[in-house]
Image: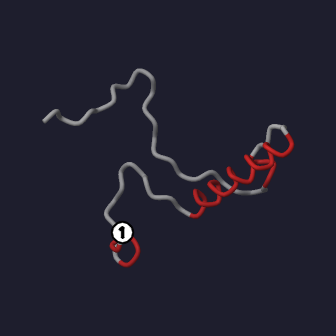
Amino acid sequence: MLEDVFGTPPADRFRRSSDERGGAYSILIGVAANHCFQTGQTVRIADLVNGLTPPIAAPMPSRSTPIPMPRRV
């Protein structure tokens, strides 16, 4: 974590770390959930804010792509 904050972090091929958009979406999910609980209505994130681009996510495998598993020890 110190390397991520103060140094040069290694490349993360799984894109596990979040950027500011991921943080904003995380907050907006909570806001939307609270609004949904209060009103009983569906809430779309896109209806809460304008111009927020989705966070960058790691590519997901297709249903037919085999998923590599770690070696058994």
Residue at image point 36% right, 56% down? 12
Q: Determine which residue is flagged by label 1.
A: 1
Residue 24 percent across, percent down from the top left:
64, 60
Kindly indicate the quadrant of the structure image that contains residue 5. bottom left
Kindly indicate the quadrant of the structure image that contains residue 28. bottom right
Residue at image point 79% right, 43% down? 36
Residue 65 percent across, percent down from the top left:
38, 25
Q: What kind of colouring is applied to the model shown?
A: secondary structure
Of all residues shown, which one is farthest toward the left? 73
Residue 44 percent across, percent down from the top left:
77, 43
Residue 27 relative to residue 8: left or right = right
Above or below 4: residue 19 = above
Residue 42 percent across, percent down from the top left:
80, 37
- Circle 1 — which element? loop
Of all residues shown, which one is farthest toward the front? 38
Residue at image point 80% right, 48% down? 35
Residue at image point 45% right, 58% down? 17
Which amino acid lies under the numbered mark 1 shown in the image of this protein?
Met
